[in-house]
Image: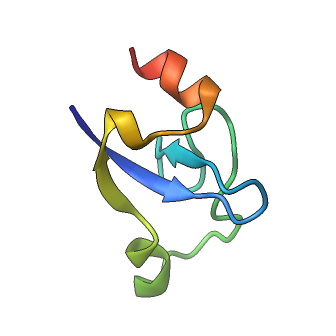
Amino acid sequence: MIYPTVLSKESNLVHIVKDQNTCVCGFTYNAFTTFTKKDLKKIKFKPEKVITCPNCKSIST
């Protein structure tokens, strides 16, 4: 299965995107209220085996 993902700069973990500000595990990748084209380019669609966040991976299965 393919998920929308984002890479965390602090921990270098790949998270599953939940909505425009947060990931499935609760990590906030976009703290701003407005969404720009640059923010959308951070989201990449990748297969489940590439996800490295243990919380996101356990929720997705």
Tell me where residue 3 appears, x and y as whole percent: 31, 42
Total numbered labels placed on residues in the image: 0
State the scheme by which the image is colored. Answer: rainbow
- Horizontal placement of 27 versus 20: left or right? right
Tell me where residue 47 appears, x and y as whole percent: 28, 41
User: Camera-side residue: 12 or 24?
Assistant: 12
The residue sitting at 62% across, 25% down in the picture is: 55
- Horizontal placement of 2 versus 11: left or right? left
Residue at far right of view: 10
Residue 40, placed above or below residue 56 = below
Tell me where residue 37 appears, x and y as whole percent: 40, 85
Residue at far front of view: 49
Residue at far left of view: 1
Residue 8, placed above or below residue 34 = above
Residue 56, placed above or below residue 19 = above
The picture quadrant where one finds residue 43 is bottom left
User: Looking at the figure, which quarter contains the N terminus?
Assistant: top left
The residue sitting at 36% across, 34% down in the picture is: 49
Tell me where residue 51 appears, x and y as whole percent: 46, 39
User: Looking at the figure, which quarter contains the C terminus?
Assistant: top left
The residue sitting at 67% across, 57% down in the picture is: 12
